Amino acid sequence: MSAVRLRGAVTPASPTAAAAPLLVLLPSLGTTAELWDGVVARFADAPGRPRILRVDLPGHGPSPAARDGFTVGDLAAGVRQVVDEVGGGAFHLAGDSLGGAVALELALTSPDRVLSLAMFCSGAAIGTPEGWAERAAQVRASGTASVVAGSAQRWFAPGYLDAHPDGPGGHALRTLLDVDDESYALCCEALAAFDRRADLPQVSAPALIVAGAHDAVTTPALMRELADGIPHARFVELADAAHLIPLEDPAATADLLAELLVPDGGGMRDDGRDGVRDDGMRIRRAVLGDAHVDRATAAITAETAAFQDFITRYAWGEVWGRPQLTRQQRSIATLASLITGGHGNELRMHVRAALRNGLTREEIAEVVHHTALYAGLPAANSAMAIAREVFAESDPTEESNG
């Protein structure tokens, strides 16, 4: 087998970051490094922004096309070579789908180099060998144009493309047309042969495993199994995403990666008041979603501005920003507190937030069930009704001060 030659591009670290870490980002099959544009943009203003290296797959973006077969291990070696070309050393690593498989391979084969591992919509084995063989044959016969319609269904949550007609999703599908057909087919064959399920206990790096609730390829159930097999792994399920989480929800992706890079807030935080507010806004958007925060911000008046600033700084920057509890644990505590206090409007908002933070519907229902013992049946009954309404919503519209 020939060596795989890959190319990457570096985004410099924040000028104020001391000894900034290197974060390597890997895309999914059929996409380019542009998959991470929204994530990189959200790191742009962070005081301790890491140095970011994005690497493209063979025949994708600027990486040369491949004509000979390769394995996921070869792709991992190609990524490691690009890292060495930009300075080498240890690095944090994140990938979506095939990129996540390559990241896992690197964590297993270069444990002394990988500081942390984030896998979005990926797995230790993805799909079936037969399915990948069929996809490779289809692309060789009819080109990547023949998989655009199927990719649109697999990649995005229902309604995403309609809600963002001029957004990055449509651009990603158009980019798929430019991917080299043979390189795409060879990537399919590399995935067909990839199976690291038996080796998961050997992963030594802290790991983040993120699933999209609407992903029919690497389903939340499969991703949870992946997390269960990796020591020191955290599992998160995002309620409004499918298979391309970094593109569909860049705010949540950036926030999760920031936590993984510096779990205590470290270089991504600024101890000044502006830094606390910036952290608070970042966390608020990650937990509540951009749409909710944008509506709340647009509704600010001269009378409410100070209160909104208070919420962002102290609720989200100071309390939600503390590292002692995970986002999921804070959601559980918040739900229980709101149920006990009978704060239905805030509860509705935080049921949605709990789903974004990775709690399942069953876990949220269990929180309500448990809280009934201490808060009383009437409060829990009202809370369960609110939770059912939120679960049934396709386009949440409820407002709150947040």
Image (tube, helix red, strand yellow):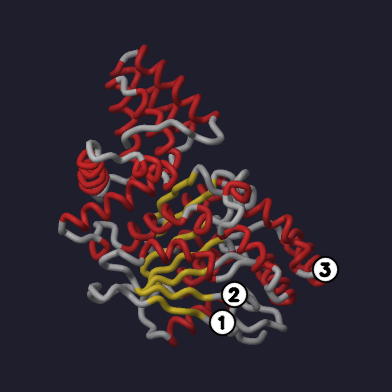
Residue ID at (31%, 65%): 45
Badge 2 is on which residue? 57
Q: Quadrant of residue 110?
A: bottom left
Nearer mark to the viewer, of 1 and 3: 3
Badge 1 is on which residue? 6
Tag 1: residue type?
A: Leu
x and y percent of residue 131 in the render? 75, 59
Residue ID at (78%, 70%): 143
x and y percent of residue 65 in the render? 67, 82
Q: Is residue 281 left or right of residue 145?
A: left
Residue ID at (69%, 65%): 192
Classify mark 1: helix, strand or loop. Answer: loop
Mark 3 and mark 2 in contact? Answer it, CB < 8 Å: no
Query: Which residue is outermost to the left?
Result: 272
Mark 2 and mark 1 in contact? Answer it, CB < 8 Å: yes
Badge 3 is on which residue? 142
Tag 3: residue type?
A: Ser
Q: Is residue 361 left or right of residue 141?
A: left
Dot 3 or dot 2, earlier in sequence:
2
Nearer-the-camera pick, 49 or 230: 49
Label 1, label 3: how far apart the Cα atoms are? 25 Å
Nearer mark to the viewer, of 3 and 2: 3
x and y percent of residue 94 in the render? 46, 65
Is 372 located above or below residue 118 in the figure?
above
Classify mark 2: helix, strand or loop. Answer: loop
Residue ID at (20%, 57%): 274
Tag 2: residue type?
A: Leu
Dot 2 or dot 1, earlier in sequence:
1
Classify mark 3: helix, strand or loop. Answer: helix
Label 2, label 1: how far apart the Cα atoms are? 6 Å
Dot 1 or dot 3, earlier in sequence:
1
Label 3, label 2: how far apart the Cα atoms are? 20 Å
